[in-house]
Amino acid sequence: MKSLILLFLALGTLIARAAVPTAAELFPQDTLALATLPDYVSARTQFQNGSFGRLWADPSMKPFRDKVEAGFKQEVLGDLEKQLGIKTDDYLGLLQGQISIGVVENGWVVTDTGSEPALIVVLDTKDKAAELKTRLAEIRQKLADAKKPLKVEKIRDFEFSTVTIERKADKTDGKADKDDDDDTKKPDSAAKPDRTEHWTFGQVDSVLLLSDSTQVLEKLVARLSGGAVPPLAELAEFQASSQSTHFKDSIGFAWVNAAALVKQLKKVAAKSSGAAAPLGVEPARMFTASGLDGLKTLAFAASFTPDGERSELMLTVPEGQRLGLFKMLEFSARDSAPPSFVPADAVAFRRWRLDGKKTWENLEAMVQQISPQAAGMLQLYLGTLGKDKDPNFDFNKSFVANLGDDLITFQKSPREKTLAALQDAPSLTLVGSPDATQLANGLKAASSLLPTAGDGSKERDFNGHRIFGVKMPGKEGGDDGKLLEFSSGNGYLAISTDPGILEQFLRSGDAEGKSLKDNASMAAAAEKVGGMGTGLFGFQDAKEGTRIWWEVLRQGDGLDQLMGVSTGANSDKKLGDWVDFKLLPPFEEVGKYLGLSVFSGKWESAGFNLLGFWPTPK
């Protein structure tokens, strides 16, 4: 019996050791940033079953998909395969469990040029540990055959190899010439010298580890082999970020220790403090005044459910530490549903219950704290604004005092299927006000702040409303710019460069018609993100919003502008060579995979949360 008990204990120990810790349990507490997929196979399956995964896999997408995948392998992975003498397809099958990438502080001092954070990659192959061992042996042999500098060492009884990579610095100035084939570029005398990197890789049970720091690797190897290294999961700042249900059920998440990064940046600012600065702006003072001292962490999580895809963005900023930018952006939970005047054919809508007057006051306070001189100059300028036309004009009384707590934007589909029309889709911005007429007059007086061109301001009457216009500068400062118009109506200051959507709003008090607020699908989706009473709500008709883009891309219109991006520093090919939008199927064949999306944001005692939801189209 005693032998049987010992056997069970031994088996239990082996099973416990075989279980790879989660990323939060594996990475050390001085981790600055972490991104992880806890289970790659599960995440891939859930993505494939989601709307975008099914769209990508649709048979009608095969010509486009095949060319993209072939181009990616050749142009992006080809260089890696050439350097290591491997085929990436032979290694992709090893991805079975956790995939994590982290940046660890590792004694980093930002003012010390010899100290840098460490990057580490974790890949769990689960039951393919034997194959991983074989593949790593192949890589070591190929590196040795290529006479690459290779060092073998032990980290806690596990064998690791370090390869030295010499990266050649770019000897050009990096600026794009008008002619890509022009070989007359002059070398940059200040070009950085060649860089030497040391990358260490090895295997611990089923886990592949890769890092540019053996010190950090030692911590993770210790955790994987039962060592007592304090993990990230026990850090209070991480625990505060990971309490939400969305975070716990996610297929993947990212986390940033913002407080640690701000601490490092403050060291740089402190080093430069005391030097002559314009308007007496002390760099170190800006962190406190802007509120960055109060930002603790950033976190993002994504999850897939049968009814749709979810996301959550979290900023941990404790209520008592919100200053500067965070005080300016803070808002209360208020009705943020579409008002009745927002038309049913709006393809995008945003409503933010931000108190404009308080935001302005907090902005002035922040500027005052950063630079009293700058604050004084601002007050002097605003005090004289508009008095050249009206000696009795007071900007604060006319404009600032009439800012309300309602900011709305919505957009309609472009009127034509062209790239130019897509980039100039009809949209309207509305600013709530207790006296919208006074607010419009204040903006008119303040229009001298706006860049103008051509013959400047214009005015016209429409349906009993006075519409003011300011000519904006065009391309390269020319006079072919758009006319930015604004007017007051229905308790809002309305601003747009599209006369039609502005006039439709000004008529909305008299007109009858369907409203976006009656969209039942939007209302149902909103319940998944906490409803439309959080103070910030947004809606996007992804299907209609994508339709015209899709067809324009299929026609090849504007690809030179959209696809003029190189695939790599050592490649003269363009992304458009292998992302051939002309191979896309007609939108009607794939539009069924697209629906709508919603988001809502709210402030809580711990910080700010932004929830997103993409319902699965029925």
Image (cartoon, helix red, strand yellow):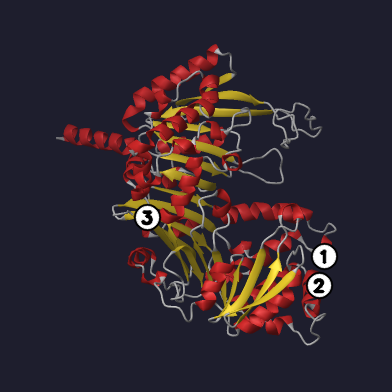
Counting the numbered discs, the total is: 3
Residue 595 is marked as 3
Q: Is residue 95 left or right of residue 289?
A: left
The residue sitting at 74% across, 31% down in the picture is 172
Query: Residue 544 at x, y = what percent?
Result: 42, 55
The residue sitting at 50% across, 15% down in the picture is 142
Query: Residue 201 at x, y = what percent?
Result: 50, 28
Asked whether residue 155 is in view, the answer is: no
Which tag, 2 or 1, sits closer to the chain's start? 1
Query: Residue 150 at x, y = what percent?
Result: 56, 19
Asked whether residue 505 is in view, the answer is: yes
- 34 and 328: which is toward the camera: 328
Q: Secondary structure at mark 2?
A: helix
Q: Which three-letter amino acid code belongs to the residue tagged 2? A: Met
Q: Which three-letter amino acid code belongs to the residue tagged 1? A: Leu
Which tag, 3 or 2, sits closer to the chain's start? 2
Q: Which three-letter amino acid code belongs to the residue tagged 3? A: Gly
- Give the residue number, with chain letter if any, for mark 2: 377
- 433 and 312: which is toward the camera: 433
| Image: 133 above or below 575 | above
Q: Nearer the viewer, mark 3 or mark 1?
A: 3
Quarter of the image where one finds residue 62: top left
Give how far apart the Cα atoms at labels 2 and 1 are.
10 Å
Residue 279 is marked as 1
In the rendered image, the quadrant that contains the C terminus is bottom left
Q: Do residues under tags 2 and 1 come within 8 Å of each other at their CB atoms?
A: yes
| Image: 150 above or below 600 | above
Q: Secondary structure at mark 3?
A: loop
The residue sitting at 47% across, 41% down in the picture is 554
- 424 and 107: which is toward the camera: 424
Q: Nearer the viewer, mark 2 or mark 1?
A: 2
Quarter of the image where one finds residue 568: top right
